[in-house]
Amino acid sequence: MTRSQLFTLFFLILSLFSIHSIAQESIANKAVWEVNRIDLGTILAEEGKKIAEFKFTHTADSILLIEEVLTDCGCATANFTRDSLSRGGEGLVQIEFDPISAVGDFERMVIVKGNLQSLEDTLYIEGHSIPYPDNPLIDYPVKKLDLGFRQGKVRVGNVYTNEPKLKTVEVFNFGAETIYADSIAISGAEHIGVIKASDSIPAQGRGLISLSYDGLKKGDLGFFEDQVFLKWNSSDSVIVDVIADVFEYFPPVEKANFRKVPQLSISRKEIDWGDIDDSEVKEEEIILTNRGQEILEIRKVQGNCTCMRLEMNDDKIAPGQSLILKVIFDPSGRFGRDQRNIYVFSNDPINPIQSLILKSRIQ
């Protein structure tokens, strides 16, 4: 090996060692944050400023000092630990957010810079801000006793069986008395409850009520509309309609197990009967097949109309086997273009909900 080649090899080794050392120092010098994103939830503008606190620990041997904290909006101001921190020291970055500047969903970025070369971390605060209404009678048109709601029904959305879904409901108190949180309760459905409410909802003022919808306690799958009783101040009680779609939760499946788990295959996803008479009852047989290597369980078959009857002779399908889903459609009392949906719920973890469409033109 020539002198030139030896020099080149030495330079490469030295460079790799330097890069490795810098990388180790960079990693070691970073502050360890408990969280880097905080959700402030739903905020009413009149509630005033909200505080988000980010805590961190310094784990390196070098001295750490936060030099500045920058925010991407004048609506967020920062206060932070200004003392020098040695190894094991704990610090705090406190962000004060003014909701008046935001309408609807918001996300704000916070950049933390320090004396160490590697310390330039990014934090986030997020939430949903609701401005004060110009005219409560218009903005809260659905009035139930003294409570005003923006909509006639509370829409929870998709709910999974692994954890309860939280829904925050905004209400306006048109009454003459304050409503206190400890007097608010819901009854009529064990799977729906009040988990939090504004400390108080003043007379002629707003408040928030957070509901919890437990899909596991519901004990069923599909679309549901529950009527519950919202009660406050000992005597007042109103009926609230709560809408949700409940789905079974399945953890992610590893790629190597794709062919092993139950797999539902539906022979036809769309049926078009064309022109039919309103006295002509239609029947169709749909083949459900298990293409997996474990037993397939049909949890539920649900149509979106009482005009359909759905029949199966079993709810379990062995690997490689099939069963027949019989669909009976009665179009009486209907006219014109008609479309109906059927939903099949199963323990297929990759496609647990599948649907098929029925179309017709009723004469």
Image (cartoon, rainbow, N blue to C red):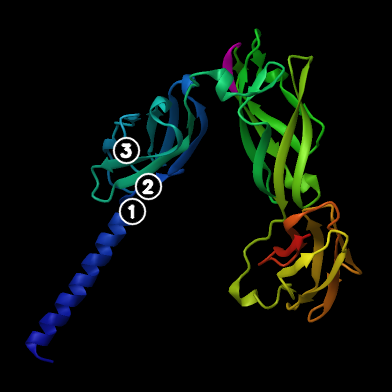
Q: Earlier in the sequence, mark 1 or mark 3?
A: 1
- Residue for point 40% across, 41% down: 124
Q: Position of residue 110 (x, y in %)?
A: 34, 39
Single out the residue that lies furthest toward the left: 3
Classify 10 as above or below 121.
Answer: below
Secondary structure beneath dot 2 equals: loop
Q: Which residue is mark 2?
A: 59
Q: Amino acid at mark 1?
A: Ala
Q: Position of residue 176 (x, y in %)?
A: 65, 7
Q: Which mark is residue 358?
A: none
Tell which of 4 and 156 is nearer to you: 156
Classify 300 as above or below 117.
Answer: below
Q: Is residue 214 visible?
A: yes
Secondary structure beneath dot 1 equals: helix
Give left or right: position of 73 versus 174.
left
Tell which of 243 and 218 is nearer to you: 243
Mark 3: give few (<14), some (14-19) or many (20+) Cα within 10 Å: many
Tell which of 135 and 330 is nearer to you: 330
Q: Amino acid at mark 2?
A: Thr
- Residue for point 81% across, 59% down: 300
Q: Which residue is mark 1?
A: 28
Single out the residue that lies furthest toward the bottom: 1
Q: Amino acid at mark 3?
A: Leu
Q: Which residue is mark 3?
A: 85
Q: Earlier in the sequence, mark 2 or mark 1?
A: 1
- Per the rendered image, the range of residues in magenta is 203-207
